[in-house]
Amino acid sequence: MSYTMVIADDEPIVLKSQELFIQKEFPEIDIVGMAKNGIELKEMLEAYRPDLAIVDIRMPGLSGIEVMELLKDKNLGTHFIINTAYSDFEYVKKALDLRTDGYILKPGKRQEKIDTIGRLLRTVKEEREESVKKQYLDAALDVVNPVFGSEILLSIFSEKCDEENFQAYLKVNSIRFSAGCILTFLSKKDISRRKINQEVGSLLDGICDFLATVTKEGTVVMLFVPEELSEERQESWRDEVAELIAGKIDEVAGEKCLYGTGGIYRSFADMKLSYRESIEQLKSESSMEAFPAPQEENEDRNKDYVQRAEQYIQSNFAKDIALADCAEHVGISPYYLSHIFKDKTGRTFIEYLTEIRINFAKELCLDQNLSIKDISERCGYLNTTYFYKVFKKMVGSTIGEYRKEKQKKG
């Protein structure tokens, strides 16, 4: 097994002697860089990400300590050995606070150097073996999880709700379940289960955990509702995520899909109820899709409904609102409002709400004192990660990029 190392010292003689020592005592180590100052050391560490680095504490430009401080959040995976004189021992203590892996003294005993470097090589070897095991496990989970998840969902469809397998799935994937709901999506085009898991997984990364499968009824997704989400916020969060997934399925299938959302329950056994509700809502949406356009005499009334809905959204977008809230304010059913709103505006309720929120977010971005979390909450998004993804999708750039662009334009 071979290893890589960078050596840094501002004294050429010391640098050369260390190189010769390593080559003689540790032929398995490949010295990929020799730095004469802190700036060179930083560049080499970032470029090579070596297994080990022997670093002189005091060097021109940047000290060894300063380089480690600059790179401590980069996750280089490098094990640092401080090379220092006896007089700098107090300085070494600061290095040890940075989780330095060891130190050797100038001048130092040959066997102490061998012991220190040898110990770290064993550590690197163990880390590599653990990394390989983790890679194998992750690869296995990538294959097994979709199948395992599908079996759990199938138990929900049959109303048996396999609690034992569900608990095993949670344990294997280190997931906590506090509440969940079922979403059912109907698309005419066949989509593979693996494709759905990949696409939905990428979409929901950082938002929530999920299970997904494809059946003859359509694509079924079980969302794990984040624990930190308040009960008042959960339904609107579910609707926003459902709209997000529907958009992704539209993109993959190349056609518009319908979907139904089930209720949110704290018990896995109640997921069968959530599934039934998602199917019932999907049936209602499917029927509406087949309905003829509203009669001419109802046009004015429907136009008024939509205008009142738009006014409600514009006045309450910063609050935790959902389609059901808007429909109640207007005085019609959520299903009917959903149909006429899309017919009149060309956008769904969520699309319209999102547009209003993101336009307001763009205005707030001009205030450099506001953090992303501040902007997210003022726009009605309590999940900052979700807000970040929606903003990037709608605007085409991250909030940071958008702010820089506006600053350049003055």
Image (tube, rainbow, N blue to C red):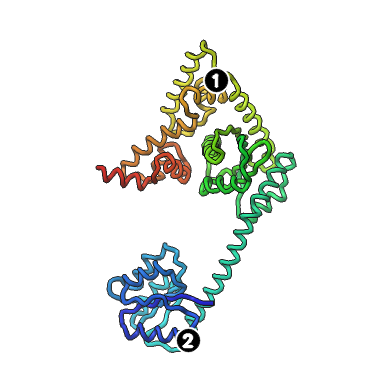
Of badges 2 and 1, the one in the foreground is 2
Secondary element type, mark 1: loop
Q: Is residue 244 above or below residue 143?
A: above
Q: Which residue is mark 1?
A: 332
Element at label 2? helix
What type is the residue that disc 1 sits on? Ile
Work out whether residue 398 or residue 81 is closer to the camera in this orientation and state it: 398
Q: Residue at x 52, y 27 (%)?
A: 325
Q: Position of residue 238 (x, y in %)?
A: 55, 37
Q: Where on the picture, by quarter, is residue 406?
A: top left
Tag of residue 25: 2
Q: Which mark is residue 259?
A: none
User: Is residue 126 rendered to the left or right of residue 366?
Assistant: right
Cα distance in 3D space between marks 2 and 1: 82 Å
Which quarter of the picture shows residue 171? bottom right
Q: Amino acid at mark 2?
A: Glu
Q: Earlier in the sequence, mark 2 or mark 1?
A: 2
Q: Nearer the viewer, residue 206 or 191?
A: 191
Residue at the spot 44% in from the left edge and 28% down from the top edge: 313
Q: Are marks 2 and 1 in contact (CB under 8 Å)?
A: no
Q: Which residue lies at the image location 54% right of the left edge and 28% below the top edge?
A: 324
Is residue 301 visible to us here?
yes
Q: Residues within 10 Å of mark 2 (few under 14, many from 20)?
A: some
Looking at this view, name the residue that lies furthest to the left.
410
Q: Nearer the viewer, residue 135 or 388?
A: 135
Q: Position of residue 37 (x, y in %)?
A: 31, 75
Quadrant, the C terminus: top left
